[in-house]
Image (spheres, rainbow, N blue to C red):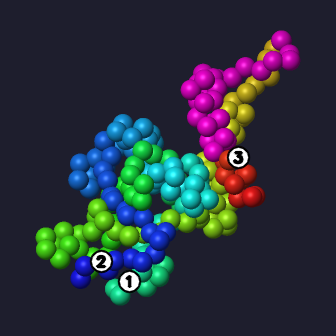
Amino acid sequence: MKILASADREALTLTTIRSHDQYNTTIYGLNDRYRGITGRRDVVFVNERDLASRGLKHGDLVDISVVSDAGSKSGERVMRNLTAVAYNIAQGSIATYYPEANVLVALDHYDAKSGTPSYKSTPVLLRASPTHEVLRRLVADCQCIKPDMQRSMSQMTPSPGGGRSSMSSEAATARSPRKRGVIASRYGAINRRIEAAAT
């Protein structure tokens, strides 16, 4: 069965892609030097104009749902809580990583002539993730940060000279510019999501 043409004007064409550190379905790392993504794969690349026309912006949490047709029901195939990345991709198209996006490709959605699955041409809708999902993600992010901060605090000991405190070498490493940058980056992302959820 081939995908039916969608009459939905908001529909975008999803294409699945591989990252730099990936061979077929084998993922060797979470970095994608091709597109400037590091340490994660839960992203969707979207043209900035397509984001703006949907009231979205770079960094927002979004859900991707397949446009329903005769072979699927509305909301049946959904990929949730991806971070939108404004990217230089053709307007009307979005891209996310394979094999994670396989959940959006039905077995009976393939090209009638070649039999190739619709990995490069799936009609989808892009929506902001529900507020409760955004908040759930924020809590998860906070839980990831908290242990690092608690560990650093527990390794601080009173200095004989008074006033200042000394730390173990491990805690000092945690206070390094690179580590501070990671924590600051996480806090910045959390603050932006809180502000977005509040509006």
Q: Is residue 3 above or below residue 148?
A: below
Q: Is residue 41 above or below residue 70?
A: above
Q: Residue sitting at 33 percent across and 59 percent down?
A: 15
Q: Which mark is residue 191?
A: 3
Q: In the rendered structure, which disc, 1 or 3, sits on the residue that comes first in sequence?
A: 1
Residue 44 coordinates in the image, percent (x, y)? 45, 54
Answer left or right for 90 relative to 52. left
| Picture residue at 34% right of the left edge, 77% below the top | 5
If you read the primary sequence from the N terminus, does the residue marked by circle 1 or circle 2 appear first? 2
Q: Amino acid at mark 1?
A: Asp
Q: Is residue 86 left or right of residue 186?
A: left
The residue labelled by disc 2 is: 3
Alpha carbon distance from label 1 to label 2: 8 Å
Q: Which residue is mark 1?
A: 69
Residue type at mark 2 is Ile
Q: Is residue 189 above or below residue 94?
A: above
Residue stretch in magenta = 161-189
Q: Earlier in the sequence, mark 2 or mark 3?
A: 2
Give the secondary structure at mark 3.
helix
